[in-house]
Amino acid sequence: MDAHSHGAASQALDPERDTFPKLVRLNAERRPRKIAIREKDYGIWQSYTWRDYYEQARLIALGLASLGFRRGDRVVIVGDNRPQLYWAVMATQALGGVPVPVYQDAVEKEMEYVVEHAEARFAVVEDQEQVDKLLLVRRACPRLERIVYDDARGMRAYSEPFLLSLAELQEAGKKFEVGHPGYFDAELAKGRADDVAIICYTSGTTGTPKGALLTHRNLLVTARNAAADDGVGEDEDVLSYLPMAWVGDHIFSYAQAIAVGFTTNCPESASTVLHDLKEIGPTYFFAPPRIWENILTSVMVRIEDCAWPKRRLVQLFLGLAQEIERARLARRPVSAWRRLLYPLGRLLVYGPLRDNLGMRRVRRAYTAGEAIGPEIFVFFRALGVNVKQIYGMTEASVFLTIQRDGDVRLGTVGAPIRDVELRISKDGEVLYRSPGVFGGYYRNDQATRETIVEDGWVRSGDAGFMDGDGHLVIIDRAKDVTRLADGTLFAPKYLENKLKFSPFIKEAVCIGQARPYVTALINIDLTAVGNWAERRNIAYTSYTDLAQKPEVYELITQEVTRVNLSLTEDTVLRGAQIRRFLILHKELDPDDEEITRTRKVRRGYIAEKYVALIEALYGDRDHVEVEAKVTYEDGRTGTLRADVRIREVAV
Amino acid sequence: MSALSQAGPRPLLEVQGVSVRFGALLALNRVSLQIGRGEIVAIIGPNGAGKTTLLNVISGFYHPYEGRIAFEGRERTRLAPPDVAALGIARTFQNVALFKGMTVLDNIMTGRLLKMRGSFLLEAVYWGPARRQELEHRAFVERIIDFLEIQAIRKTPAGRLPYGLQKRVELARALAAEPTLLLLDEPMAGMNVEEKEDMCRFVLDVNSEFDTTIALIEHDMGVVMDISDRVAVLDYGQKIADGPPEQVRKDQGVLDAYLGVSHE
């Protein structure tokens, strides 16, 4: 592990404040009354101060200690974003244990893999749903000793002796403390900056998940550096609505929140996020491109439903703002009359719309994970929402680059934050080195060796280059940039993103490696196309039915043609235009393993599963019959039969 | 009270030899049914067997021309629906009966009406005890909203919701009355598999968390067999079987009724 610590990585941290639990205690002393975390429950925002945060986590830790918790034990944490689960993370760390958050919608099989691989002794989960899954998992993983649940609802009939509620655990903690005064403080003091703070299992676009080991130092230094570089202060409010198992949420809602001392807000339920967003009005917001896309789509759908005077007005001003923003991003001057009209637009359209979306107070909003459509990016920036791209990954404790205020431009992901070094390998792959670089994958030395190369440089897996101003540009996943049979360069993700910029296309998979031409499998966006169909009086029953309507094919053909047209401007990639496509009869779904839980396409799996469709795309028939296996949310499977059309597009 | 109910196994609801006649049609013919405290009882039977009529008799919407009904040991054959509701019996309807223009929250609040006391004047100015009372009821309703996981539609007009959710809101309104006995008329009709599973779980949770006794009419045999403690089968206005699900499933009379053996 010494091999990849260099200058900045070994920078000294005050031993009084070098772990997250120590920092929480510090927050509890310094700002006891400041709100640390809020949760909407029973329709009301319930607040917990830093003192509450510390006290609650302390009792959980003591409760765990009463169950025989030993330093180094792993604790699986599963559930929606809840204060109680963040406290459990801190409680685990305070005792020198390692929290292992798991995606809350993981099916039993996926959960079993993590519990088994991490050799977890304890689990702290949200509710009955997760308990049920873990009860099944436990049969295969007897090492899992105790399961603690927060929400007692529906749990009355469970008699398993290894189940207990969080309230019971905290009660046990109080009793334990009577017999062991000073135990918690002693354990807390034993924590070191280089202890593992968390194991984040990557959702794994290829093969089985890998557990990245991140230390307190990794997370703390990176969180602080990013905050300092982008002016994040202690008066921020974030909405924590992305899965706790994802390193991004861990950084924003836990690491940075504690290191900087700002407030985390937990929505009422997954389905109320957009509403809660409006109520909280976060100042610091993160959303992956698909969420920005969803918000934009819902705005567009609502605008379409307006009466025409209102619609015309909104369209006029949105058009104006986007022209101004495009000019600004391209460093072009903005004409005087446009500058004069902008305040009127802010009064009539941008302000109210931003307020309605809950983005009135946003000082900075990040997007990352995938390329964001320029239309979407420009739209939100035009409204006055300071959306910026960042680039990072689990193995780097998230932050590598950020677009700084006043230096935002289309197509780049910004410049490196302090202490981060970037280099491009001779194969065009982005390599990085920083204090945030992880300590390797848990129990997977081979993967670690493949990722961390010489001198602590880490392979990102992305192909990219640095532009003239020191900004990083990402082209695609390094292994995904390939060539057609005739040697033409082909970047599938680049094409897919262009397709997905259309509001009607939700997901796309482009195929072309060692093939004569490029083809695409497309998923339509049910909301947008459904609305479009309704307005044209096209009746449909289901996704499958709508997807195969000739009118819908006509619509998507126009979108594909638009993408092909935009490719002609690109000298390198102009040869890789889409010749034939089809609209899939079902939506790509993580339950069917076609996309990951973070909605990244699993190319290899799709190529295997839809081999008949892909062969048909390279044949000359104009339709193909398919049978597909679908997995319902309860884990049962069924088959879906459909006749899928294939359409040619002008190149 | 609880000592009494433990001492003597007196059922919560006793229906004895009840008959209902619509003109020449004998909708219920001397039907007897007992429902014990904490039970989930399913009432099944072919179309027109008299299931809904039986619920209507229990809820006081119809009055039987013979037979008697006792609730918590007291005779109450001829009470009107509001009085029945005041006793602690709430219901949902086969065809959803919500106030379509009102929000989900307001719909559920109407379920609390029977629990509200106070003067019209104080409520009009929302002052003093009226305000306190409103807040208490709202807090209770919020617990139900949380319980049935309908937070996202709290402020949505009920009429704009899909059918499955309307059914859930109706259940919420019935629960708001804190009933001892809950009557559900086809709570899962017209739902897809996933919605049915959710509803099953809610019914079981209501039963265990609120100690509510439940009588439900349902056509989906899978659901009935899964969640009920006891099944009563009606056919042509008569009860032809009553017992645990496994037993009823094998009953020859029940099989005949469902397979349509002639009644001559």
Image: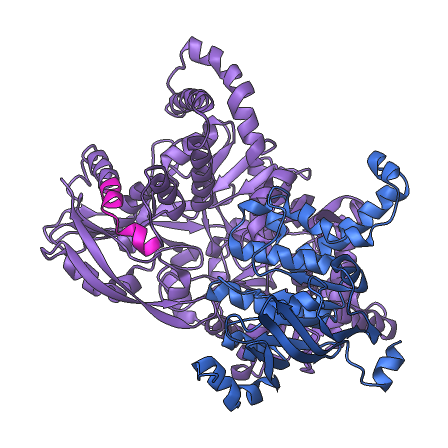
Q: Tell me which residue sits at (28%, 55%) in the image.
A: A584
On screen, B125 above or below A143? above
Colour logic? by chain
Q: How many marks?
A: 0
Question: Which residue occupies the foreground of this view, B253 or B223?
Answer: B253
Seen as rendered, the residue at the extreme top is A336
Q: In the picture provided, is A476 more to the left or to the right than B35?
A: left
Determine if residue A508 is in view: no
A545 falls in the magenta region: yes
Question: Which residue occupies the foreground of this view, A488 or B227?
Answer: B227
**Residue A503 percent location from the top left of the image:** 36, 40
Residue B75 image-quadrant placement: bottom right
**Residue B7 percent location from the top left of the image:** 86, 86
Q: Tell me which residue sits at (70%, 72%) in the image.
A: B208
Please identify the dominant SS of the magenta region. Answer: helix
Determine if residue A637 is in view: yes
On screen, B191 above or below A144? above
For the colour purple, the matching chain is: A
**Residue B124 percent location from the top left of the image:** 83, 35
**Residue A344 percent location from the top left of the image:** 52, 15
Q: Quadrant of the C terminus of chain A?
A: top left
Residue B16 image-quadrant placement: bottom right
Chain B tint as drawn: blue
B80 falls in the magenta region: no
Question: Which residue occupies the foreground of this view, B80 or B254?
Answer: B80
The stretch of residues the image draws in magenta is A543-556
Question: Which residue occupies the foreground of this view, A211 or A534?
Answer: A534
Q: Tell me which residue sits at (60%, 58%) in the image.
A: B168
Q: In the picture provided, is B250 more to the left or to the right than A580?
A: right
